Amino acid sequence: MPDAKMNDIATPEDIDVLIDTFYGQLIQHPEMRPFFDHIDLDHHLPRIKHFWRFVLLNDPGYTTNVFDKHVHMPLQKKHFDIWVQLFCTAVDRLFAGDLANEAKLRARTLGFTFAHKMEQLNTPL
């Protein structure tokens, strides 16, 4: 259970800390690391941070279709499960509160939705 003294997610800087922490773990995971072998994280992470600022802090201007950016990847349900688990663990290590809970809910929703869509795309008609 998170420490009651932990702060909630409240600022763009909080999102930066969360995403830096999360991706630091994600790219080290043996099943996830291959997806990042050819990605320039210095270019990619600001986009991810902008997405989460849009989702959690209502930061305007994010218009990219996130699913379309991942559809070409050979992702399976197990990869989304790992992604969600690591994201929620990072949130719990860093934050506590309503927006932290919302971040975990949004991550679970994204993971489920992406996994379902990928399964549908890869199922023969």
Image: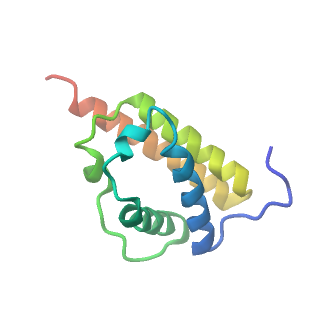
Q: Nearer the viewer, residue 62 or 28?
A: 28
Position in image of residue 115 (x %, y %): 37, 35
Residue at 72% across, 50% down: 93
Q: Quadrant of the N terminus?
A: top right
Count of picture labels: 0
Q: Nearer the viewer, residue 68 or 125?
A: 68
Q: Is residue 20 above or below residue 86?
A: below
Q: Tell whether 7 sits left or right of 77.
A: right
Residue extending farthest to the left is 125
Residue extending farthest to the bottom is 60
Q: Tell whether 84 sits left or right of 72.
A: right
Q: Is residue 54 above or below residue 30?
A: below
Residue at 37% across, 76% down: 61
Colouring rule applied to residues:
rainbow
Position in image of residue 106 (x %, y %): 52, 51
Position in image of residue 15 (x %, y %): 57, 66
Q: Nearer the viewer, residue 85 or 33?
A: 33
State the image quarter where residue 123 is shown.
Answer: top left
Residue at 51% across, 45% down: 26
State the image quarter where residue 85 is shown.
Answer: top right
Residue extending farthest to the top is 124
Q: Nearer the viewer, residue 8 or 21?
A: 21
Position in image of residue 72 (x %, y %): 22, 43
Q: Quadrant of the C terminus?
A: top left
Residue extending farthest to the front is 37
State the image quarter where residue 100 is shown.
Answer: bottom right
